[in-house]
Amino acid sequence: MLIFEGGENIPKNSQEQINIDERKVINELKTSANKSINSIAKNCGFSRQKVWRIIKKLEKDNTIWGYGTVIDEEKQGLNYFILMLKRSTKPVKMEIVENITSREVDKHIQEMGCEMVTSLYVHGNYDWIIIFTAPNISQANRVSELFKVRYHEVLEEAHLLETIFPAKIHGIVNPEIGKLKTFF
């Protein structure tokens, strides 16, 4: 980045400028994916056509995988739960790998009246983090048991947490953030 008199930053090359422009559009989409292209263009200082081209490119190369809506699950009678799974050191059979990657377990969770929100493979004390919604702790325990039974050959530990208050989801601050004060 070159810095000129007045502190203005000028990118060194066009690829760097492309990256900066993409980041601006992504940041706009992250705050509200349902913004119009005109609104995004105005906020970024770009033409409508430029924003459209950037979004199409990001969708094509899977930088953007999809769009979602952040919902107050509590108003829907649901709670967020986090299931933390630790893998054993035993080798994993291809059948289990196929089952995990096919997302077959998602259907079973849905049949229980729950929904998998996020599934993360991680490095650390745990190997797999599942965030899901359920109407109550009893249903959440059923989801936890599903994983323990289905993947018993490769799981060493499974811990279930219930979230108390979602302060921020997908980069969007809960509009009722003031309620968080009651937990302190």
Image: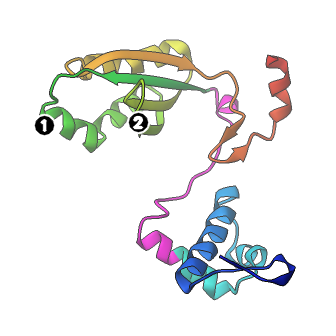
Say whether residue 35 is visible.
yes
What is the x, y in percent for residue 105? 32, 33
Labels 1 and 2: the sequence-earlier one: 1
What is the x, y in percent for residue 154? 23, 22
State the residue in front, 79 or 19: 19
Picture mark count = 2
Looking at the image, residue 174 lies above or below residue 16 = above
Q: Residue at x 26, y 43 (%)?
A: 102
State the residue in front, 158 or 104: 158
| Residue bearing mark 1 | 94
Looking at the image, residue 25 lies above or below residue 129 = below
What is the x, y in percent for residue 90? 17, 22
Q: Residue at x 64, y 45 (%)?
A: 70
Which disc number belongs to residue 109? none
Q: Quick one: SS at disc 1? A: helix
Q: Could you tell whether 93 is left or right of 160 in the image?
A: left
64 in the magenta segment = yes
Measured Cα–Cα span from mark 1 to mark 2 = 20 Å
65 in the magenta segment = yes
Name the amino acid type tagged 2: Val
Name the amino acid type tagged 1: Met
Q: Judge depth for marks 1 and 2 and give the one in front.
A: 2
Q: Quick one: SS at disc 2? A: loop
What is the x, y in percent for residue 22? 59, 72
| Residue bearing mark 2 | 122
Q: Residue at x 40, y 18 (%)?
A: 144
Q: Could you tell whether 52 is left or right of 8 in the image?
A: left
Q: Could you tell whether 69 is left or right of 173 in the image?
A: left
Report the span colored magenta: 56-77
Q: Residue at x 19, y 40 (%)?
A: 98
The residue carrying pointer 1 sits among few (fewer than 14), some (14 to 19) or many (20 or more) residues within 10 Å by Cα, namely few
Kindly indicate the quadrant of the structure image that contains residue 177.
top right
